[in-house]
Amino acid sequence: MNFWDVRDSYDAVIFLRSAACGAEERYTTENNTARQEKDAEKAREVDEATLAVWIGHPRLMIIESCEDFEEKKQRALRAILNVIGDLEIERKYLLKAKPNLLCKALKDSVKVSIEQIYLETGERIRRVNQNGYNAYYLTEKKLVAGAGGVLRKEEERGIGALDCIYFSERCDPASKIIRKNRRYFVYNNQYFELDEILEPKKLWMLEAELIDENDRVDLPPFLKIDHSDEVTGDPKFTNHGIAKGL
């Protein structure tokens, strides 16, 4: 067993920011004898180091600190319910140009390589490679009506390498294999996936998973992108649509 086995054994990671990050006046050691960080500065360092360990997990949700702790708890509860209900609330954007991969956020990002194959059943299999470690998944996604963004009910399970070979023999002949590099990074407490699609055509796409349908996406300023570039719900820019050449 290695680091990726342990990290990805969790269905999701819900990371609650310390009060030292955004609600500093609320940070105290008086109500928690187990808290070892004696000041907010040290707590921020530990918070960032802990978050960095989870970057690269396919489903990481960050709960910001706020003045109202009850609001923070409610957002965490909504995130948990989304995971339990296999519900994803996604926003997707098309980049105008190739990003500068040497900027700090992308230089510090976690990169994985993904091969995605669609089956005749409508399911898909994915092979994910990170630093020589391979993981395999069988996934089915279904659209769910929603007021904002796109809501998807996702059912995914890990499979073995031999299962991946078996399922790939049932590939949909009308769909091409998608090969892409994905970079995971955090900007302003939002977890992003930046996809560099290599095949069957070259595209750069940014995706964010929201906790609530009404959440606003704070787009990273170091990417050539704005809200007019949103392609959420456009069938041409779903992975299945790209595989079919729509």
Image (tube, rainbow, N blue to C red):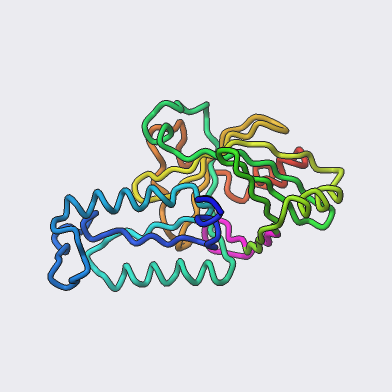
Q: Could you say which quadrant of the image residue 104 lies in?
A: top left
Q: Could you say which quadrant of the image residue 19 lies in?
A: bottom left
**Residue 214 placement (x, y as % from top left):** 44, 60
**Residue 243 placement (x, y as % from top left):** 74, 41
* Nearer-the-camera pick, 216 or 124: 124
At 75% from the left and 39% from the top, the residue drawn is 177
Which residues fall within the magenta stretch?
140-152
Principal secondary structure, stretch drawn in magenta: strand
Relative to 61, 133 lies left or right: right
At 69% from the left and 31% from the top, the residue drawn is 201
Judge whether residue 229 can be spotted in this image.
Answer: no
At 40% from the left and 45% from the top, the residue drawn is 186
Q: Is residue 90 magenta?
A: no
**Quadrant assignment for the N terminus:** bottom right
Relative to 69, 219 lies left or right: right
Relative to 192, 166 lies left or right: right
* Nearer-the-camera pick, 104 or 227: 104
**Quadrant assignment for the C terminus:** top right
Judge whether residue 85 can be spotted in this image.
Answer: yes
**Residue 62 placement (x, y as % from top left):** 39, 57
